[in-house]
Image (spheres, helix red, strand yellow):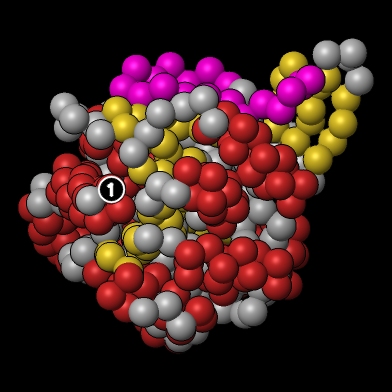
Amino acid sequence: MKVLMLGWELPPHNSGGLGVACYQLCESLSKNSDIDLDFILPYQAEHNINFMKVHAARPVGVVEIQQAGTAYDSYKFIFHDGHEEWKDIYSQVRIYEKTVADMAKTMSFDIVHAHDWLTFRAALKIKEMKNCPIVLHVHSVESDRAGGRYGNPLVREIEETSLWMADMIIAVSEHTKKAIIRDYSIPADKIEVVHNSIDPNQLLPLDNNNSYRYLMQLKSQGYQVVSSVGRLTIQKGLTNLLYAAREVVQRMPKTVFLLVGSGEQYHELIALSADLGIGSNVIFAGFQRGKQWRDSFAAADLFIMPSVSEPFGLTPLEAGYYGVPSMISKQAGVSEVLHNCLKVDFWDINEMANKMVSFLRLQALSEVMKEQLTAELSDISWEKSAGKIRNLYGRQVNEVYA
């Protein structure tokens, strides 16, 4: 079975969990001997991937497409005659749609699998051209990204139209399935839940030389560290985390919060931590990859993901593989598969602070949670999710081509 996969990012040129999920899902799908994958990205980069063919959606006359910052910022188009043009994300979505449609004319495939709104228009265009089945994979809806608010009306229109036109919808959690039904009135029987997972083989081991030397020095003096890794956006609930952190620091002054990530709230959150009087207890490490990213887990006594609305959320699983227990919001999809963790409503600042304080004071609780985490994570795998998706492919192809 030939699958045309449409996605917006892949590691190491990714800005978040979407690229990681796409990479690991495709790797697991490729282990099926009857699956042949072509993946189209909106930019050019070296990915060193041998389990599928990766293509760049490059329009005629363009020599190179470069990211400017993250995968969701502006793109620089370099043309044959040497001139350059900058395209914002919405222009790039339109260019991707047209270019992918042109590429699809000369490609052979049985089904199209598209990830999130950025690629949905391209999938619809191919469906119109070739009358092939399309599967739309929803990693988040616009109301998630807007922190529970309405969000961008253009994005919502793309999501609503595409989801109604799709042959099958995959949601990364029951949380996301409910959001799709709530926001767009899509019939429930059109949506299949396939939880994200994580491939421990992609997680490099830790070493004894933690790059956060200041934190390690503080820990040697009795400090404890609470870390959070993710984009600094309203969706991630970090404002509430800082208010809860103030209560924690008042009761346990030797607590430090490490925030790893970048985003539009960066300066706002720095100012808020200062206004709350906890500036010396909060460290903003910026966006990290590789060893610095891994060491942010290793330095932590507790990992926290306080998202306002999180379709899934891979970071608590990653923290668990590095031996760090988590506190997650009940509004996160990962709470459907991860049970050995602390759970709290994102808005309940007092309860968030109480649970952090209780956990940090009870070393025995930490050890029990670590032991149970190991057993629980061993039962979570991409192979199960990939197998379910393979069956969905077969069902859709049989219905369309019967």
The residue depicted at 64 percent of the width and 70 percent of the height is 157
The residue depicted at 59 percent of the width and 36 percent of the height is 100
Q: x, y (%) of residue 293?
A: 46, 38
Q: x, y (%) of residue 187?
A: 36, 79
Where 31 sits versus 150, above or below? Answer: above
Where 275 sits versus 318, above or below? Answer: below
Amino acid at circle 1: Tyr
State left or right for residue 247 relative to residue 398. Answer: right
Where 242 sits versus 62, above or below? Answer: below
Q: Which residues are magenta?
A: 45-62
The residue depicted at 69 percent of the width and 61 percent of the height is 265
Where 94 sits versus 52, above or below? Answer: below
Residue closest to the far top: 81
Q: Is residue 52 visible?
A: yes
Asked if the magenta segment contains residue 394, the reply would be: no
Q: Nearer the viewer, residue 330 or 241?
A: 330
Q: Is residue 291 visible?
A: no
Label 1's element? helix
Q: Nearer the viewer, residue 266 or 257?
A: 266
Q: x, y (%) of residue 298?
A: 35, 42
SS majority, magenta: loop
In what quadrant of the picture does the N terminus appear? Answer: top left
The residue carrying mark 1 is 401
Location of residue 175 (image quadrant): bottom left
Q: Nearer the viewer, residue 366 or 115?
A: 115
Q: Nearer the viewer, residue 33 or 242?
A: 33
State left or right for residue 81 relative to residue 144. Answer: right
State left or right for residue 394 relative to residue 77. Answer: left
Characterize the local packing of mark 1: few (<14), some (14-19) or many (20 or more) Cα atoms within 10 angstroms.
few
Q: x, y (%) of residue 140?
A: 48, 63
The residue depicted at 46 percent of the width and 27 percent of the height is 107
